[in-house]
Image (tube, helix red, strand yellow):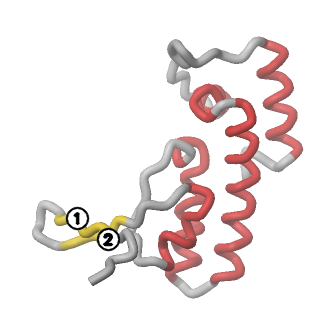
C-alpha cells in the first residue's frame, strides 16, 4: 500500500516510531501525518517552542499550535536569509553557547552583519519569552 512517505523506524525496545519527511517550517503537518518526533537544525535555538508546538498539537490545541508554528517560521525565514548554519551558530552564541564558527565554504558574520541579524531577530521577537 501507499505509505504517503511515512517511514517506520524500529527502536531498541522493538517498538516502532513514525518518521515523516517534512521540514521544520511544517512540523505541525508532520505531526498530523503521524510523525512522533523530528530532526532539525533550528531545534538548537527554538527547542522550547518546538516542544510547545508538539504539546499543543497532541492536546488538540490546533490554533495554538498553528500560532507557534508561524512564530517559528518567521525565525526560520530570517535564518534562511542569513544562511541557516551561520545563523544557528550565532544564535547559539547569543544564548550563551559558543559552538564555534561556521566552516568553509560557509561564511561567518561580519560585526555589521551580526548586529543587523540580531536587530532583525529582536524585531520578530526572538528569543521568545
Q: Residue 37's image quarter?
A: bottom left
Instruction: Rate crowding at label 2 as few (under 14), some (14 to 19) or many (20 or more) other CA atoms within 10 Å.
Output: some
Label 2 sits on residue: 18
Label 1 sits on residue: 9
Judge whether residue 91 can be spotted in this image: yes
Tell whether 42 sits left or right of 77.
left
Residue 101: x and y, percent? Answer: 55, 16
> Which quadrant would the N terminus be assigned to in this image?
bottom left
Instruction: Classify 15 as above or below 105.
Output: below
Whether the residues at callouts 1 and 2 have beta carbons within 8 Å, the answer is: yes
Tell whether 116 sits left or right of 40.
right
Residue 65: x and y, percent? Answer: 65, 74
Residue 80: x and y, percent? Answer: 68, 39
- Name which residue lies at 27% across and 70% down: 17
Residue lying farthest front? 1
- Secondary-structure class at tag 1: strand
Residue 74's disc is none
- Name which residue lies at 68% across and 56% down: 72
Asked whether 122 or 96 is in front, the reply is 122
Tell whether 43 sits left or right of 125.
left
Asked whether 59 or 69 is in front, the reply is 69
Instruction: Rate crowding at label 1 as few (under 14), some (14 to 19) or many (20 or more) other CA atoms within 10 Å.
Output: few
Q: Residue 116's image quarter?
A: top right
> Which quadrant would the C terminus be assigned to in this image?
bottom right
Q: What is the tally of numbered marks visible in this picture?
A: 2
Distance CA(mark 1)–CA(mark 2): 6 Å
Amino acid at each position: 500500500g501507499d505509505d504517503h512517505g511515512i517511514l517506520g523506524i524500529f527502536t531498541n525496545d522493538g517498538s516502532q516510531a513514525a518518521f515523516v519527511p517534512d521540514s521544520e517550517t511544517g512540523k505541525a503537518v508532520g505531526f498530523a501525518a503521524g510523525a512522533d518526533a523530528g530532526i532539525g537544525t533550528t531545534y538548537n535555538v527554538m527547542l522550547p517552542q518546538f516542544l510547545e508546538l508538539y504539546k499543543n498539537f497532541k492536546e488538540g490545541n490546533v490554533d495554538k499550535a498553528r500560532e507557534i508554528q508561524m512564530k517559528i517560521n518567521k525565525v526560520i525565514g530570517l535564518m534562511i536569509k542569513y544562511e541557516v548554519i551561520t545563523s544557528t551558530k550565532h544564535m547559539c552564541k547569543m544564548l550563551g553557547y559558543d559552538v564555534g564558527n561556521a566552516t568553509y565554504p560557509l561564511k561567518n558574520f561580519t560585526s555589521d552583519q551580526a548586529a543587523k541579524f540580531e536587530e532583525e531577530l529582536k524585531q520578530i521577537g526572538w528569543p521568545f519569552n
